[in-house]
Image (cartoon, rainbow, N blue to C red):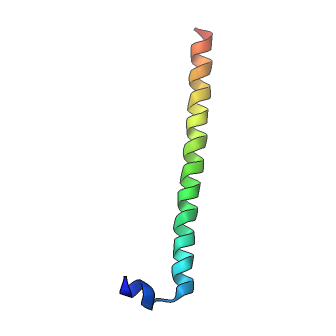
């Protein structure tokens, strides 16, 4: 914790922002994948 406080505040905030951005992209891709799987399964089960 002391090492985090001694570092530059700007670089710490930038690192946090990058991590949050990657998490956001991951959840967006996860949502898109689940929606496409749901549509594919709906199409399969409606035909049969």
Q: Is residue 31 above or below residue 13?
A: above
Query: Which residue is pictured at 62% across the width and 19% down the height?
Result: 43
Q: Residue furthest top?
A: 48
Numbered-mark total: 0
Residue 36, by quadrant, is top right
Q: Quadrant of the C terminus?
A: top right
Q: Position of residue 16 (x, y in %)?
A: 52, 72
Q: Quadrant of the N terminus?
A: bottom left
Taking the image as shown, residue 47 lies to the left or right of residue 16, namely right
Query: Which residue is pictured at 55% across the width and 36% down the height?
Result: 34
Q: Position of residue 3 (x, y in %)?
A: 38, 87
Q: Is residue 30 above or below residue 41?
A: below
Residue 2, by quadrant, is bottom left
Query: Which residue is pictured at 57% across the width and 14% down the height?
Result: 45
Query: Which residue is pictured at 58% across the width and 47% down the height?
Result: 29
Q: Position of residue 18 (x, y in %)?
A: 55, 69
Q: Is residue 2 above or below residue 26?
A: below
Q: Is residue 16 above or below residue 25?
A: below
Q: Position of residue 25 (x, y in %)?
A: 58, 55
């Amino acid at each position: 914790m002391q090492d985090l406080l001694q570092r530059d505040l700007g670089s710490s905030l930038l690192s946090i922002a990058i991590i949050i951005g990657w998490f956001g992209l991951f959840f967006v891709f996860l949502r898109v994948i689940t929606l496409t799987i749901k549509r594919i399964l709906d199409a399969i089960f409606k035909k049969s």
